Amino acid sequence: MSTTLQNDLFIRAALGQQTERPPVWMMRQAGRFMPEYWEIKNKYSFLEMCKTPEIAADVTMLPVDLLDIDAAILFSDILVTAEAMGGDLSFEQGVGPRFANPVRSMAAADQLATDCLDKLQYVADAIRVIQQRLNGRIPLIGFAGAPFTILSYLVEGASSKDFKLTKLMLNNEPALAHKILQKIADVTVDYLNMQIDAGVNAIQLFDSWALALSWNDYKEFSHQYNTYILSKIKRTVPVISFCKGSSVFAPIMAEANPDVVSVDWNADLKNIKQALPSGMAVQGNLDPFVLYADKKVIETKILQLFERMRGENGFIFNLGHGIMPDIPFDNVKHAIDVVKGFRY
Ligand code: CP3
């Protein structure tokens, strides 16, 4: 796969190989911090954008053309799997995602569909359009939400600060939680295999909210299902495992055998890398709030990270989490230019 790419820095780093500089892409690189995103967003709802392959491709290509990053990421959302399973999903401006029919009982769990790949075909279509547009310039990353993070939205019905209802289910009704998690995991395997068949060059599994869990609960309710998914999908492309909480959970995340562990900004990236099995790559881990700062500060903090990682193979530069909508576009561009100007 990588041999057909004009720029394969990202793939080489993901496979633990040496690169002349770290490759760069950023979570939420196609989004509201870009005026060009708003031009599209003002005409369509977010879900319309995700579900119309030509529009999803247009948005995916924005950071490719405007930021010159080393990898594109499919424009979609982690919650589309939960919608295909029967979740009544909407996105309201300023409110975020909502499920009108939260899943909080065995009866509701029984109703969740697992044979629902037909409802996600628009994603495979979008991938094919994007790959035509990319035409081998850079790799395309596909993705899915990890079962625990998806469960939290299905149970809470919306974003949550404390995951109170989700944790109540894990504690009082673990069998119910496991039932839903297994269904999500099965759909995710099919969904990621569909993306791989449609032509993505890498996969990222987003377990954004695993940071809410204790060590034991992480193993039981998150890690177990991520391991299942990583063991069942076709391992023909590199797989990145992301969670906020990876500063703590990285050693267990590695047991699921991803190619790359994506690290939040609390950890010293070199220490994390050296604690991982040899050859396993890391991705991260600039605090996204640095991108609000003066350009000189942005440069200094990126170079600080690179000095620390000098001599380490298998390093993809990214943020510890996504770009916030009010970060100045010029600062994001500057950060990417700093990375691209660096040589080990
Ligand atoms: O990274 C990219 O540019 C690719 C596209 C992408 C989106 N969401 C687009 C999006 C990806 C990879 C995601 C993943 C996602 N979605 C995650 C995991 C990553 C993370 O941020 O932790 C999560 C938890 C979600 C769920 C979600 N989607 C939330 C909580 C929200 C609303 C809050 C917010 O940040 O706005 C969304 C909406 C969403 N997903 C937007 C975008 C561009 C904003 C939609 C809009 O324009 O209103």
Image (spheres, helix red, strand yellow):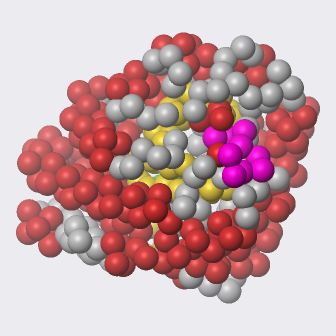
268 lies left or right of 32: left
The residue at the far bottom in this view is: 43
* Image quadrant in which you'd find residue 76: bottom right
Residue plotted at (27% across, 43% down): 228
Q: Where is residue 121 in the image (x, y as percent from the top left)?
A: 43, 76
Q: Position of residue 332 (x, y in %)?
A: 80, 48
Q: Identify which residue, 62 or 195, lies in the foreground.
A: 195
The magenta-colored residue range is: 3-11
Residue plotted at (79% across, 30% down): 21
Residue plotted at (36% across, 78% down): 119
Q: Where is residue 71 in the image (x, y as percent from the top left)?
A: 69, 50
* Image quadrant in which you'd find residue 215: top left
Ligand 1 falls in quadrant? bottom right
Q: Quadrant of the C terminus?
A: top right
Q: Position of residue 50 (x, y in %)?
A: 54, 74
165 lies left or right of 289: left
235 lies left or right of 60: left
In the image, is residue 25 above or below residue 85? above
